[in-house]
Amino acid sequence: MLLIEGWLKLATGEFDKVADQARAMVEATNQEEGCLHYSFARDVADPDLIRISERWASQEALAAHSASAHMAAFNKAMGSVKREGADLRLYSAEEVRKLM
């Protein structure tokens, strides 16, 4: 399993410009084969800080996601907003046990 976790900091008010595209991206991605979990969330303390969480069954599933039309459309939309920083990391993992 692959995990992607991180954050994206946008300039004040910029996320509102791409919120519809972000919702469409999450919806489409969660339907992809090999996607176990995919979400964006606004930080409760900073609405311009977007938390990113992903779980993928395989590298092949992640590669297909990266090549998808909805990823290209989302990247185009994100190119129109001002980003102040980002930290996104890929981890290789195995599920040890479910906590809840």
Image: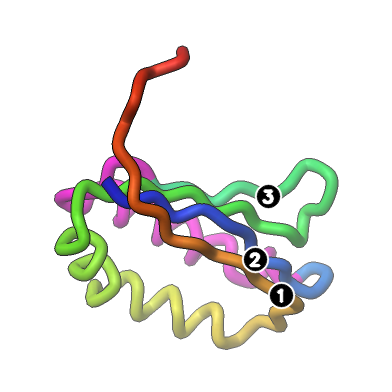
Q: Is residue 58 left or right of residue 23?
A: left
Residue 65 occupies quadrant = bottom left
In the image, what residue type sits under mark 3?
Arg
Task: Tell me how far mark 3 sits from mark 2, CA to CA.
Answer: 10 Å
- Binning the other alpha carbons within 10 Å of mark 1 as few (below 14), some (14 to 19) or many (20 upward) gives few
Question: Which secondary structure lies at badge 1?
Answer: strand
Is 27 one of the magenta-colored residues? yes
Picture coordinates of residue 6, whole percent (x, y): 58, 57
Name the residue located 54 percent from the left edge and 64 percent from the top edge.
88
Name the residue located 29 percent from the left edge and 72 percent from the top edge.
66
Asked if labels 2 and 1 touch by Cβ distance under 8 angstroms, the answer is yes
Q: Residue farthest to the top?
A: 100
In the image, what residue type sits under mark 2?
Leu
Q: Is residue 1 left or right of residue 21?
A: left
Q: Which mark is residue 42?
A: 3
**For residue 100, above or below residue 2:** above
Q: Which mark is residue 47?
A: none
Q: Nearer the viewer, mark 3 or mark 1?
A: 1
Name the residue located 65 percent from the left edge and 57 percent from the top edge.
50
In the image, what residue type sits under mark 1?
Gly
Question: Which secondary structure lies at badge 3?
Answer: strand
Between discs 3 and 2, the one toward the N terminus: 2
Is 32 one of the magenta-colored residues? yes
Decide whether the magenta segment is chiefly helix, strand or loop.
helix
- The residue identified by callout 1 is 85
Q: How many marks?
A: 3
